[in-house]
Image: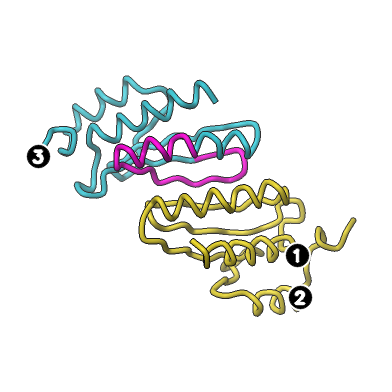
Chain colours: A yellow, B cyan
Amino acid sequence: VESRYQKLSEIERHRALKKLDGWALVEGREAITKRFNFTTFNEAFGWMCRVALVAEKMDHHPVWLNIYNVVDVTMITHNVSGLTTLDFEMAQKMDDLFKYS
Amino acid sequence: VESRYQKLSEIERHRALKKLDGWALVEGREAITKRFNFTTFNEAFGWMCRVALVAEKMDHHPVWLNIYNVVDVTMITHNVSGLTTLDFEMAQKMDDLFKYS
């Protein structure tokens, strides 16, 4: 198995988290989460569409809740019930797309 | 105010709910909910895109959680903190689009 798909240790998780902007560990669960605030539904869902294309290409999908102009995202690798490099890669891509939305 | 935007009475809510397929009242809240199951993320998000266009046109948006091939939807009219005809119209449109996804 490629290392991107292997569960990260606690030290690796914290190191990866430090590199991200505004993401946090979920209380009591091995997952990371962030709230993305937009101005309108158009902007929120437009961003979701761009993220969806990336997620599908990577075959790694977010858990996300959308309420009008807000999207709450949780990233977790279900196969390992924890965090892998894939989660942090997707988180970074979401942040990158957010900057241009 | 047009009647579509007015809060429904309990009798009206139950009458409207009966006409829908698989929707239920949320426990302890004036809202309706339904889980939509798809085969893939592609199908789930494709359906969400079509619903998003309708929601934007109606200016009435769902609260929805997507986990890969599953979408949990809640409809509520935030202005009145309860259910209006708009919620049931959107619910019916979601069911209609689901049939063709």
Residue B63: x percent and y percent? 40, 46
Amino acid under disc 3: Val
Does label 2 or label 1 sit earlier along the sequence?
2
Residue B53: x percent and y percent? 41, 38
Residue pointed to by mark 2: A12
Q: Against A24, is B16 above or below?
A: above
Residue, far left: B1
Q: Is residue A76 left or right of residue B75?
A: right
Residue pointed to by mark 3: B1
Q: Which residue is depicted at the point 18% across and 33% down?
A: B4
Amino acid under disc 1: Thr
Q: CA distance from mark 1 to mark 3?
A: 52 Å
- Badge 2 and badge 1 in a common chain: yes
Quarter of the image with the C terminus of chain B is top right
Q: Using the image, name the chain to which the residue with label 2 belongs.
A: A
Quarter of the image with the N terminus of chain B is top left
Q: Which callout, 2 or 3, points to the residue nearer the camera?
A: 3
Q: Give, as a single range, the part of the protein colored magenta.
A: B49-71
Q: Is residue B63 magenta?
A: yes
Residue B39: x percent and y percent? 64, 31
Helix, strand or loop at mark 1:
helix
Q: Using the image, name the chain to which the residue with label 3 belongs.
A: B
Residue pointed to by mark 1: A85
